């Protein structure tokens, strides 16, 4: 007998949040279960690592990225539902330098990362 596939999960704190945080790694095309909302699943548009944000709906360029019920950033381009939301497509409202951080490590570009 085969073991049923468990969907990766993410959590959304407030109903106004347009992003959720992944609790497990998710592969492109997989439906992830959303905890804390009425919405049950969203299909991931690309591979996303645990701890990172996924768009729960389309987010037009210039729109606030809302997490925990508060605007934490703004989309620097249109973001599709299921897409990874990170430094490459949003900017912080609190730290202007965050847009220039290394995408994978989060290190400042002037800091060597090994």
Image (cartoon, grey):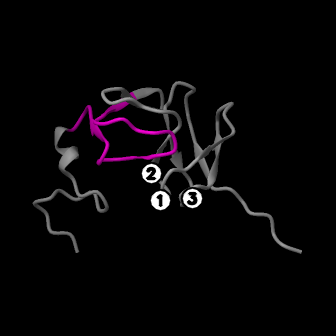
Please indicate whether residue 23 sits to the left or right of residue 71 in the image: right
Helix, strand or loop: magenta stretch: loop
The residue indicated by pointer 3 is 24
On the image, the x and y values in percent for residue 103 come to 28, 57
* Farthest left residue in view: 110
Tell me the quarter of the picture where residue 23 sits.
Answer: bottom right
C-alpha distance separating marks 1 and 2 = 6 Å
Q: Mark 1–mark 2 contact, CB under 8 Å?
A: yes
Q: Residue at x 55, y 61 (%)?
A: 27
User: Mark 2, residues whose alpha carbon is within 10 Å: few (<14), some, or many (≥20)?
Assistant: some
Q: Residue at x 46, y 46 (%)?
A: 83
The residue indicated by pointer 2 is 52
Tell me the quarter of the picture where residue 114 sits.
Answer: bottom left
Q: Secondary structure at mark 1?
A: loop
C-alpha distance separating marks 2 and 3 = 9 Å
Q: Is residue 76 above or below residue 109?
A: above
* Quarter of the picture holding the N terminus: bottom right
Q: Residue at x 66, y 34 (%)?
A: 39
Please indicate whether residue 20 sits to the left or right of residue 4 in the image: left
Q: Is residue 112 above or below residue 100?
A: below
Magenta-colored span: 71-95
The residue indicated by pointer 1 is 49
On the image, the x and y values in percent for residue 15 come to 57, 26
Q: Secondary structure at mark 2?
A: loop
Q: Is residue 39 above or below residue 84?
A: above
């Amino acid at each position: 007998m085969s073991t049923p596939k468990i969907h990766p999960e993410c959590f959304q704190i407030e109903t106004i949040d347009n992003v959720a945080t992944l609790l497990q790694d998710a592969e492109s095309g997989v439906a992830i279960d959303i905890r804390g909302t009425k919405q049950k699943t969203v299909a991931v548009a690309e591979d996303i690592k645990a701890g990172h944000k996924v768009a729960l709906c389309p987010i037009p360029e210039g729109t606030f990225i809302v997490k925990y019920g508060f605007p934490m950033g703004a989309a620097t381009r249109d973001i599709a539902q299921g897409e990874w939301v990170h430094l490459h497509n949003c900017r912080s409202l609190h730290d202007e330098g965050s847009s220039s951080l290394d995408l994978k490590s989060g290190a400042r570009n002037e800091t060597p990362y090994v």
